[in-house]
Structures are given as C-alpha cells and as structure tokens.
Image: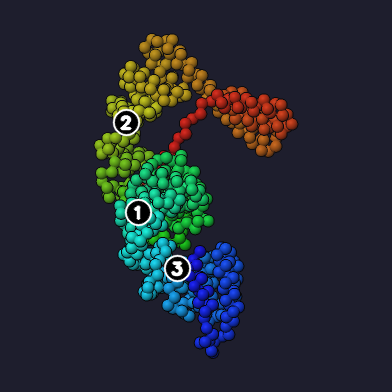
Amino acid sequence: MPRRHLLSFAALLFTLPLSGQAGKPTVDLDAATTAMRNGIDAANRNDLAAAKRYFTHATVLAPTIPAPHAALGSILLAQGDFGNAERELRKAHTLDPKDPAVTLNLARTDVSLRHYDDAAALFHQALAADPPPVLTDEETLTYAIALSASGNLNGAKIQLAQALTRTPNSALLHDALGSLLAQTGSMDEAIPHFERAVALDPSLNQAQVHLGALLIAQNRPADAVGPLESAVAADPSSFDANLQLGRALSAVHRDVDALPVLHHAVDLRAEAGASTASLYDLALALQASGDSRAAVALFAAVTAPQSRLPMASLGPALTNYALARVQTGDAAGALPLYARALALGPDSPVFREDYGVAFLQQADLTHAIEQFRAGLTLEPNSAHLHYDLGLALKLKDDLAAAIPEFERAAQLDPTLPDPPYTLGVIYMQQGRYADAKTQLQRATQLQPDNGEAWALLGGVQKDSGDATGAAESLRKAIALEPEQPSLHIQLAALFSQAGKTADAAAERKIAADLSRAAVSHQRATFALKSGRTLLEQGKLPEAAAQLTTAAEADPKDPEPHRVLAEVLTRQGRPAEAALERKKAASLASASPQPDAIAPAAAQP
C-alpha cells in the first residue's frame, strides 16, 4: 500500500500552528490530529476501510490542511479508487505543491488513470526537490511507464537503468527494463534482463510470461515452454500465461497438449479483459492446433467494428477468419470475408489460393479458376496454384487445359504427391496405361502410405499385362486398406489367370467375408441409431429389439450393449442390465484403442 510518509503527515498536523487560518474554514486541530492518528494505526494494521473513514473525517475537520487529503488519497490509491484518489491528492498538492511524497502519489494515480503526460510532469517535479526523493522500485517502474506512454522511451530506459545501478538485484526492475527493450525491438538485449528477473525471483510470474512471449517472438518456442509452464503452474488462472504457453506448445506441434491450455485461456479471456491483440493470438493458435471451430468466434470478435483493430491488421485477420470458416465447412460464410480482405489488402498468391479454394468448396468453378489465375499472375512458379487450377479445370471437364497445369505443378515441385496421382488417374481413364503407370509409381514413391494409389497402380499394371507387379501393388494396397473387398477380388483374378486356383479361392472367400461384414456393420449401425431414437422417445420394447439386432449384427461393438443396458435399467430389469454392461466392458477392453491423432495445423 502506498503509505509514503504518512507518519510525517501526522507530525506536520500535530505541530501546525493555528496562525494563518484566518478567513479560512474552521479547523478543529485536536480532533483532526486524533482522526489522523487513528487512521495511521488502522493503515498499519492494513485495515484500509477504517483508515479511509478516519482520514475522511480528518479532511472534514481540517479541510485546508494538506496532510488529511494526502493520507486519504494514499488509501484510495491503495484501494484502486483512482478517481477519488486523484481528487484528494490534487487538493493536497494544491495546498502544498512542494511535498514530494504527495507529488509522487499523485503521479502514480495519474498513471493508473492513464494521464501519462501529467504523471511524467509530476514525477519530474518531485525529483526536482532538494534533496530529491529516492524512488522505490515500484515508483521507478511507474515513472518509466509514464515516460514510455508519453513517447519518451529513452527517458524511461535511463530511469530504469539508473535504478538498477542502485538496486541491481531487483527482479521487478529487470523485468521492466526487459519489457521496454523488447518494446523498442532490442530483443537480444531484453532476454538477459528477463532471465535475470526469473533467477532473482522465480515467483515473479510476469517475468516468466514476458520471457516466454519474447522467446516465441524470436522463433524459439521450444525454449519458451519451460518458463511458461512454470508461470501456469504458479497461477493457473492467468490468461496471459495460458495464452503464451498454448502458443508455444502449438508452435512446436504439441497440439494435443496445446488445445486444453488454449481452451482454458478462452474461458479466462472475459474476466482478464483480454486485449484485441491477445484474442487474435489466441484465435491463431487455436486454428494452428486444429480447432478452427473455437477460433471462429474469436476471429469474429477481433474483426468486429467495435474491436478497433488497426487497419493494417484487419486484412490479415479477415483472411484467417475466412480460412477458419472454410476449415469448418462454411465456405459460403468465408467468401464475403475474403472479399473484404482483398479490398483492404495486402494481396498475395497464398491469399488467392485460399480464396479460390473457398469458391471450389462451393462448386463455383468459374470464380475459383479466376482466383487461381490471379494468384499465378503474382507468382507464376507456384506449384500449388498450378495444381489447384488444374483441379478446377478437371472438375469443369476441361482435361485439355487441366493436364498441362498438373504437369507444370509436378515439374515445379517434384516432391508433391498429388500431381502425379491425379495425372495417373486421368491417364488411366484415357487408356494411356504406360503414362498412368509412370505417374502412379511416382505417386506411391512420394506417398507410400496411400493405399488408393497402390490399388490404382495394381489395376493399371494388371490391365497392361504386368501380373507380377500388379500382385505386388495390390498386396501393398491390402496391407494399407485391409477391409476393402474389391482389392481381394482383383488379386483373386490375378491368381486365377496364373492358375493358382487355391489362392484365388482364398482371396474370394476373404472378399465375401469382408462384404458380409460390411453389410452387417451397416445393418448394425442402422439398428443402433434406431434404438437410440426409440429410447429417446420412450419406446423401450421397440428400442430393446433394435439394439439386440445391432448387437447380433456386429458382435464386436460394445455400444449396442451399453445402450441396451440403459433400456433394461429403465424397464426395471437391473440384473439383465448389469449383464449387458459387463459385455460392453469386455468388448471395449478387447478392442484395440486407436492412437491419438493430432489435428493438422491450420495454414497461417
């Protein structure tokens, strides 16, 4: 609590003579002295409410004496009542403009009210006293804030640097100087100050957050994770700490870890009064980690007129908002956003590609082609844009124009698997088996886990008379897509041609079993869905019948047993319900659990 020289205020009041009060409001000096003493005692007990009452009473008893106003102002400042604090401290300063303690508290109050120019002038006035007061770390920091906010960044640096010569082990001052250096672009100089602040006081969370945020800005997110994890562990309710940790985890592609942290930041944003810039960073991190749906609402808030986003940032924000719409399947909602972003600029090949993809998602091929061609005007050697243009032309059945675009894309970036795959499909459809084989072989080399490409290659090899190559390709396709009956049928045909009747029969049996399993699975899915609907409608006997059918159709699925247990429970058949739950648990434990798949990162 700012209680600078409260006792000296009281002493001044105790010794102040009554002379000089003629023509002024009556001063009850004894009562005012008692009120001041009681207020100081309450302040020392940290009973700010009582101190406020006593000091308020003192200002009534001695309205023309500065000490009560100064004391009341300091309490109001400590309570965060900056408007009333400013009023009382202003009165005290008017009554005694040479008291540096009053001047400093008034300056601090003006900083809290964002009256930075006034605050800087008051600090300058206080330090002009003879002798000048020695500022506390907190006062130095406040003075630096006033100077920085009023445009005197160099003066702020000087104040902080001079203070650090007096108190070199002040974590608060190191953090402040680091922040100022980072603000002025001196990031390399800022890092040691943040690191020193953290070393001096590991509990200074703001220093941990500042260090982490700066490391992210320097493209060192892996180094940022440690200090930011410490900050979140120390203060789980800190919006800034959660935001920056989520950004760091997202940047190192630890999306599974990042998303819970980012979602927590979303929950904290309102109470924290998060800035527009912070909300934008949060939206970008969510989008990059695969949760574009959560990002959409934040992008909407950031780009709303009342957010007052700087015009230079509005175009990119609208672009990312539009991209999030496309990623969530709302291309129709994305198109007007892209149009606004294009009007604001800047234009770029990537922007035109994204805009074209939105039209493509809407099956508006004409406008998609227009955007892809506009992008190629900006960057003629973009393999992605040539491929996208080729795809749009193919969908428009203009293969004569599409094929050169795919070929150009493959030439510009030989590592892309999509151009040779698509060319292989087109050549196969045109009966150009040799060309199709070449392209599909290239596609499987670039993307060996593409089961469909292996299947197509096997089909082309079979049709071109390469039975050995076809069998090898089909086996690779089966390994990647073991539940596709058609692959086994093709392999059976090859065995039949080679006179391997037993092998052919085995493959046909596998295909038949897979087909029956697929039919049974469809039947089970339909029955399970019907059972749930009937359960919601309260039709318990009908629901039980459907769920029994689902369990019989797909004996390995635990879900029909779980839902059937609920039906039986509602029917008052607890023993049978328990049996179904046991079956469900047994099936669930026997089923292999798929590995967690991290969502693909959004395009920045």
Asked if residue 313 can be seen in this view, the reply is no
Residue 99 drawn at (x, y percent)? 44, 75
Which of 442/290 is in front?
A: 290
Check residue 446 in the rendering and tell me which mark sits there, or answer none: 2
Which is more N-terminal, label 1 or label 2?
A: 1
Rendered view: 84 above or below 21: above
What element does badge 2 sit on?
helix
In the image: residue 383, left or right of residue 527: left
Rendered view: 536 above or below 199: above
Q: Quadrant of residue 496?
A: top left
Mark 2 to mark 1 CA distance (whole Å): 48 Å
Residue count near mark 3 (Cα–Cα under 10 Å), binned few <14, some 14–19, many ≥20:
many
Eye-nearest disc, 2 or 1: 1
Which residue is found at the position 37% from the left and 73% from the top? 131
Residue 368 drawn at (x, y percent)? 37, 47
Which is more N-terminal, label 1 or label 3?
A: 3
Asked if residue 137 can be seen in this view, the reply is yes
Check residue 193 in the rendering and tell me which mark sits there, or answer none: 1
Mark 3 to mark 1 CA distance (whole Å): 24 Å
Q: How many marks?
A: 3
Residue count near mark 2 (Cα–Cα under 10 Å), binned few <14, some 14–19, many ≥20:
some
Eye-nearest disc, 3 or 2: 3
Rendered view: 515 above or below 114: above
